[in-house]
């Protein structure tokens, strides 16, 4: 059957440098002295630590619980003791730190009890949860959680296995396909069923004839209806959108995913890991890493996740003039900030670079508008325009020219005769735009909250005033019913001013007056003359005792004695 | 002559009626300029500009009462944007209103906090939680770094801590050409 292949725009043909490391079979890297396992193994999600310092762990024991939608579990790559939990530099261009669990291997490499998972019997949801708990992420480099990518289980017709491996120097997928083709196919079948696809295509660049042959042989052995499709070696044919374009002719627009067009892509390494997780019940604790470049023994190694790179490098024997190390390929990789950073699930290759091999680019010169970059761009952008806008920090314009369609493949910078580090400008512009968007979202939130707070304060003030007014009205009503006309009249007048505070003061005044009037003792009124005479006598005696003044006449005392009434504690009959 | 007058009057009446209708029908509530200025301001609500919040400052700018260089959190970039929007001349940040600082958030030392609620009342965006005689804490993602809670604290337990870079917020640097000595 002759199938038609499609072409994507642009692309370049750099020196592949595959033969250096592709010859030797995959070897198992020896156990390092310690393993630094970052809890952040998938994009945008950090697992929650569930082990304590000093705890014994077995190989494959879970040390991090998945958290959130994009979370995946993290496992101990070998048996040993947890010796530390803290922040360690991670393999990232920023050189920032991330939370890591440090394990000291005991040398036994003893597995935790594990059993194959029956994907047929347990159903789709349980299988996806199992993949999440096995820490399955895309091993092509983006480390996107596989269980999320497997989606709803419908709507995807074509499953593509990405074995293109288009970046120069890297051969880990090539070796994996040559040596473990049956496992990859078995994993692909599992993915195929989980995603509910109708067609399985494995795209492999035609500069890997051995891998293509091995995969074909494996497919024949299994009797699978799988299309092993060699694709022309043209960088970046391994880009997801580019590979989909080449194999199916579908061009995926910006903001859409392959799944929106019925195509889903997985790396061959991911398929292999899925097979190990389902058929053997083994979580993802190791991966194949290419060690190449300026080294005496380039090759591929099966490396435990968390192995410090400085313990890995001696295996390849870097030559003495090596001055820096790149993680990933020479096109899209980055220079490692430090060498004690650990291997993570997305680390596919470490290249030793020397001033002669992979020299640093010559100084940037002015753009001469030759448009070579536009001819090379696989995303069909205008890289020179993007460059000017990014350089002048005109980010709005850069976005208008579809900066976010850029896949940072580096083709433009590769062909640029002025040696402009174009991708660096795009990365700078992208991260600035993201930062601005975050700031804007934060500002919008702050504005909303500030406005709500002002509204709330206003509302509280009103509520307080209303409460006060209600209280004043209540007091007034009570007074008018208790003290009769004069008090009501006194309170009613200020009530017309509509000021609750004034009304309350007036009410309080009225109440005080009423109390005063009430406190006029009535026990001196309407008394018999004998009692009055008695009071007068007592009063006179007390006054005489106090100041030696002569007692006044009886009649005067009887008619004019307000004194006992006004002094507190006057005796009452 | 008379016809001409009538025609002109007629046209004036018709156009006047149309304009009058349009003024009511397409009436714009509020001042759109204030909204535009407010969108540029960083919404820190710190009051360093001398106005009680970003919106009042935006209103003052729109009325021409305030200068455009009174917002330290907005920094030079904010002033440039305001200058662009309003067609005014760019001015460096006015020193009496403060200096541009890296973005910080307030952090309450929870051991020292006595639960007086003064910071809660001072916070313009309600980013502090707590109750009387209970420990208070700052909800970090909501904090604008306005520093308004620092002064009222009677036990000085609030510190402004610069926000550290994370993988999500880390930014690629502007490419700089390395100048090497010629061999």
Image (cartoon, coloured by chain):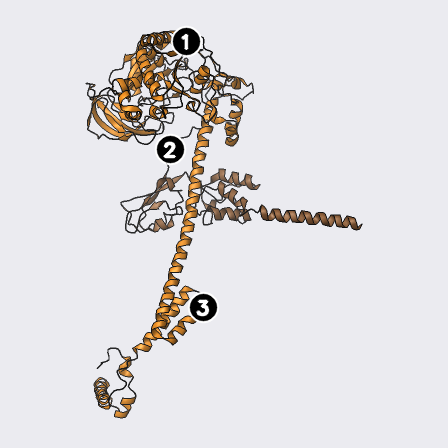
Residues A392 and A459: in front is A459
Q: How many marks?
A: 3
Location of residue A558 in the rendering, given as x and y in whole percent from the top left corner: 27, 89
**Sequence-first tag of 3 and 1:** 1
Quick check: B17 above or below A385? below
Query: Does residue A547 appear in this view?
Result: yes
Q: Are marks 2 and 3 in contact (CB under 8 Å)?
A: no
The quadrant in which the C terminus of chain B is found is top left
Residue A570 place in picture, x, y as percent? 24, 80
Q: CA distance from mark 2 to mark 3?
A: 63 Å
Kindly tell me whether residue A134 is visible in this rendering: no
User: Where is residue A531, by image quadrant?
Assistant: bottom left
Identify the secondary structure beneath mark 2: loop
Residue that label 1 marks: A207
Q: Nearer the viewer, mark 3 or mark 1?
A: 3
How much space separates mark 3 and mark 1, taking CA atoms?
Answer: 97 Å
| Residue under the point 40% across and 64% down | A501
Chain coloured brown: B
Residue shown at 50% from the left, 46% from the top: B58
State the separation of the CA atoms marked 1 and 2.
Answer: 42 Å
Q: Residues within 10 Å of mark 1 (few under 14, many from 20)?
A: some
User: Which residue matches tag 3?
Assistant: A496
Whether labels 2 and 3 share one chain = no
According to the image, label 2 marks what residue?
B165
Q: Say which colour chain A has.
A: orange
Task: Check contact, mark 1 vs mark 2: CB within 8 A.
Answer: no
Secondary structure of the residue carrying tag 3 is loop
Judge from the rendering whether residue B74 lies leftward or rightward of residue A517; answer left or right.
Answer: right
């Amino acid at each position: 059957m002759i199938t038609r292949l499609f072409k994507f725009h642009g692309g370049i043909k750099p020196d592949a440098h595959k033969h250096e490391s592709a010859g030797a079979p995959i070897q198992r890297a020896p156990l390092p002295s310690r393993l630094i396992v970052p809890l952040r193994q998938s994009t945008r999600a950090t697992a929650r630590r569930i082990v304590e310092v000093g705890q014994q762990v077995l190989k494959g024991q879970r040390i991090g619980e998945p958290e959130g939608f994009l979370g995946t579990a993290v496992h101990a790559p070998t048996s040993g003791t947890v010796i530390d939990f803290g922040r360690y530099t991670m393999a990232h261009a920023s050189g920032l730190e991330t939370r890591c669990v440090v394990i000291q291997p005991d040398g036994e490499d003893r597995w935790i009890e594990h059993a194959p998972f029956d994907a047929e019997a347990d159903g789709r949801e349980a299988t996806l949860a199992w993949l999440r708990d096995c820490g399955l992420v895309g091993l092509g480099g983006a480390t996107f959680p596989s269980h999320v990518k497997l989606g709803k289980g419908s709507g995807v017709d074509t499953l593509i296995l990405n074995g293109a491996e288009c970046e120069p120097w890297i051969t880990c997928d090539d070796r994996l396909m040559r040596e473990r083709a049956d496992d990859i196919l078995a994993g692909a079948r599992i993915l195929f069923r989980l995603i509910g696809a109708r067609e399985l295509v494995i795209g492999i660049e035609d500069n890997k004839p051995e891998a293509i042959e091995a995969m074909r042989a494996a497919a024949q052995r299994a009797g699978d209806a799988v299309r092993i499709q060699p694709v022309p070696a043209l960088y970046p044919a391994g880009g997801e959108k580019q590979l989909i374009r080449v194999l199916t002719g579908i061009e995926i627009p910006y903001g859409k995913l392959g799944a929106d067009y019925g195509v889903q892509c997985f790396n061959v390494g991911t398929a292999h890991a899925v097979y190990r997780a389902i058929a053997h019940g083994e979580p993802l604790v190791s991966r194949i890493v290419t060690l190449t470049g300026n080294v005496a023994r380039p090759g591929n190694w099966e490396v435990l996740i968390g192995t410090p790179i400085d313990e890995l490098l001696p295996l390849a024997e870097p030559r003495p003039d090596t001055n820096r190390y790149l993680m990933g390929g020479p096109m899209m990789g980055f220079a490692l900030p430090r060498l004690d950073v650990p291997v993570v699930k997305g680390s596919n290759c470490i290249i030793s670079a020397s001033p002669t091999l992979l020299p640093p680019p010559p100084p940037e010169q002015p753009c001469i508008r030759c448009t070579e970059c536009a001819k090379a761009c696989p995303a069909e952008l205008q890289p020179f325009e993007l460059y000017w806008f990014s350089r002048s920090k005109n980010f709005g314009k850069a976005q208008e020219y579809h900066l976010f369609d850029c896949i940072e493949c580096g083709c433009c910078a590769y062909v640029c005769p002025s040696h402009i580090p174009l991708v660096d400008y795009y990365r700078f512009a992208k991260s600035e735009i993201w930062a601005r968007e975050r700031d804007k979202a934060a500002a919008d939130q702050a504005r909303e909250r500030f406005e709500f707070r002002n509204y709330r304060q206003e509302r509280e003030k009103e509520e307080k005033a209303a409460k006060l007014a209600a209280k004043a009205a209540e007091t007034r009503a009570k007074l008018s019913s208790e003290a009769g006309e004069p008090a009501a009249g006194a309170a009613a007048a200020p009530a017309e001013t509509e000021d609750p505070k004034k009304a309350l003061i007036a009410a309080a005044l009225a109440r005080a007056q009423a109390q005063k009037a009430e406190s006029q003792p009535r026990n001196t009124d309407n008394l018999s003359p004998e009692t009055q005479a008695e009071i007068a006598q007592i009063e006179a005696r007390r006054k005489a005792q106090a100041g030696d003044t002569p007692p006044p006449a009886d009649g005067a005392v009887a008619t004019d004695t307000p004194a006992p009434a006004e002094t507190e504690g006057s005796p009452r009959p | 002559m008379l016809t001409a007058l009538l025609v002109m009057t007629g046209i004036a009446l018709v156009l006047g009626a149309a304009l009058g209708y349009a003024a009511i029908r397409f009436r714009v509530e509020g001042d759109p300029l204030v909204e535009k200025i407010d969108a540029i301001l960083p919404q820190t609500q710190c009051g360093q500009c001398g106005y009680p919040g970003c919106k009042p400052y935006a209103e003052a700018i729109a009325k021409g009462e305030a200068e455009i260089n009174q917002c330290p959190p907005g920094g030079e970039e904010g002033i440039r944007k305001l200058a662009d929007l309003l067609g005014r001349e760019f001015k460096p940040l006015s020193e009496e209103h403060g200096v541009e600082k890296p973005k910080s958030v307030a952090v309450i030392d929870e051991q020292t906090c006595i639960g007086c609620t003064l910071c809660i009342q001072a916070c313009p965006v309600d980013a502090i939680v707590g109750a009387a005689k209970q420990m208070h804490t700052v909800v970090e993602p909501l904090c604008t770094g306005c520093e308004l809670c620092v002064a009222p604290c009677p036990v000085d337990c609030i510190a402004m801590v610069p926000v550290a870079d994370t993988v999500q917020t880390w930014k690629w640097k502007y490419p700089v050409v390395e100048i090497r000595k010629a061999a």
